[in-house]
Image: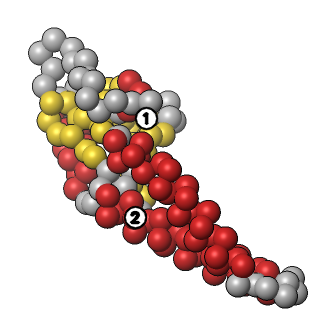
Amino acid sequence: MFDPKTPIELEEGERVVARFRADRSTYIKAHVLMAAVAGIGATVLLALVGNAHPWVGIVAAILGIGVRGTYLMSEELGAVWTLTDRALIGPGGRRVLLENIAKVRKLGSAAQVITRTGSKHLIKFLAEPDAVVNRIDAAKGAQA
C-alpha cells in the first residue's frame, strides 16, 4: 500500500508543480449517491421479480456500500498524485511522463489520464476535477 509519508523520488532537477489528493466530502457524496442508486435499483428489481420484501434491496445496498466505503476510506483518501515539470507520479510508484500523456479528461469527480499506449489512470474523488485536468494539460503544454 502507498504510504503518503514516504517521499517520492524525483529526478535530478525535477520540480514539483502540484499535488492532488482525494477530498473526503467528495468521497462520502460519491458513496451516498452510489448507495442510493444501487438501493433503488435493487428494490425495483426485487419488486419486479415478485419478492415479498423488496425493501431489503435498499437496506442491503446501503449496508454493503457503507461498509465497503468505510473500509476503503483511509486508503482512497491517502492517495496522492504529484505533478512535476516532467511527469505525473501516482500511488504505488506509478510514473507517467508528461510527453506520454495523450489525453486528460474529467469523469465525474475524477480525472482520467490516458497515455499514448492506452494505459488509463484515475485520480479519484477530487473536489475540483476540472482544475486538475486544466493543471495537467497546462503542464503538458509548458513542457512541449
SS at mark 2 in the image: helix
The answer to whether residue 104 is visible is no
Q: N-terminal of the two: label 2 or label 1? A: 2
The amino acid type, in three-letter code, at marker 2 is Ile
Q: Quadrant of residue 4?
A: top left
Could you say where residue 88 lies in the image, as x and y percent from the top left?
Answer: 30, 32
Residue type at the position of mark 1: Thr
Circle 1 SS class? strand
The quadrant in which residue 61 appears is bottom right
Q: Is residue 51 toward the left or the right of residue 78 in the image?
A: right
Q: Is residue 38 above or below residue 68?
A: below
Visible residue check, residue 7: yes
Q: Return the x and y of residue 63 as percentages of the image width and height.
A: 59, 67
The residue nearer to you, when weighing 80 against 111, is 80
Q: Which residue is mark 2?
A: 28
Residue at screen point 84% across, 88% down: 52
**Residue 108 pos. (x, y %):** 41, 63
Q: Is residue 39 above or below residue 13?
A: below
Left or right of residue 140, residue 31 in this image: right
Q: Is residue 106 left or right of residue 12?
A: right
Q: Which of the numbered marks, if any, corresponds to residue 1?
A: none
Please report the residue visible at 14 percent of the width from the left and 35 percent of the height from the top.
17
Q: Residues within 10 Å of mark 2 (few under 14, many from 20)?
A: some
